[in-house]
Amino acid sequence: MSDAVCAIKAQELRFRLVNTQNCPRIFPQQHERACGRALNNAGTRSGETKMSRETIGEDFLAPWERTDHVPIRQITVYGEPVLHQRAAEVTEFDDQLRQLVADMHATMDAAHGVGLAAPQIGVGLRIFTYIYADQDTAPERGVLINPVLTLSKVSQATPDPDEEAEGCLSVPGLNFPLKRAEYAKVEGVDEFGKPVSFEATGWFARIMQHEFDHLDGFLYVDKLVPRWDKRWLKAKKALGWGVAGTTWLPGTDEDPFGH
Ligand code: ZN
């Protein structure tokens, strides 16, 4: 992709993000609460006509509504220390946290990921975002902060490379199979501290387990059976991973999974 096309794509993406982050369909809670606060700061009451960005001024906007904020973050690659340590519990539910979560959604979307954990953008906190439509009760898009997972038993059978291969934005371009629990009960809170709880099965349960593992400092490639582990170690060596300092930027660098 040429630099010019990249620049246009990035601009379009930023425009889309500014708009989707204001869209009640995508971020209903953020929209309602951020908008409510922005209007209150500007001296209006809820129910009054919404003021324009120009009228309010950037200073009154929530951080994730500011046009000068670049939400798409660099993604860390295997070897970056933050990926291999236990992430810390979130204790402050403030605007900074909500900006981080908005950036994680934006980065996940730009990378065409179905999940993203905070250590993958260099932040050692227990947060992951996901987007996955094919499930019953959970919202299609969400965030889990300080999550707890309760899992069914993991099968000891040989993993199927066609049906059970995972990929990870921090292991760009590679896929290896592994067994996961078929069922996960997922509990945590959102970026406002509000409880989140749902049950996940099948591939959605797999995403939950993959993202949760990131918060404990494990990537899926750390859990491969010997046959696939050998191939992974070979690939890791060939790619020069396993040391700090490698990142890639979604929407700018070539998409490692060819999306
Ligand atoms: Zn991952």
Image (cartoon, rainbow, N blue to C red):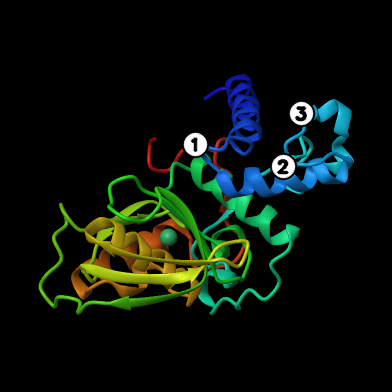
- Residue drawn at (28%, 77%) of the image: 151
Residue 10 visible: yes
In depth, the one of 218 and 25 nearer the eye is 25
Residue drawn at (88%, 34%) of the image: 57
Confirm whether residue 74 shows in the render.
no
Q: What is the secondary structure assignment of the residue under circle 3?
A: loop
Q: Is residue 233 left or right of residue 49?
A: left
Instruction: Decide if residue 122 is on the left or right side of residue 184.
Output: right
At x 74%, y 58%, the residue is 95
Of residues 26 and 202, the one drawn nearer to the viewer in this rendering: 26
SS of the residue under disc 2: helix
Q: Quadrant of residue 90?
A: bottom right
Instruction: Looking at the image, tell me whether mark 1 or mark 2 is earlier in sequence order.
Output: 2
- Kindly indicate the quadrant of the structure image that contains residue 165: bottom left
Rendered location of residue 170, percent (x, y): 47, 57
Q: Between 40 and 149, which is closer to the camera in this rendering?
A: 40
Q: Of helix, strand and loop, which one carries label 1?
A: loop
Q: Which residue is mark 1?
A: 254
Would you name the residue on which mark 2 appears? 35
Q: In which quadrant will I find the C terminus?
A: top left
In three-dimensional space, the C-alpha distance between marks 3 and 1, rounded to whole angstroms, equals 43 Å
Give how far apart the Cα atoms at labels 1 and 2 are: 35 Å
Residue 154 in the image: state x and y as whole percent.
20, 76
- Mark 3 residue crowding within 10 angstroms, few (<14) / some (14–19) / many (20+): few
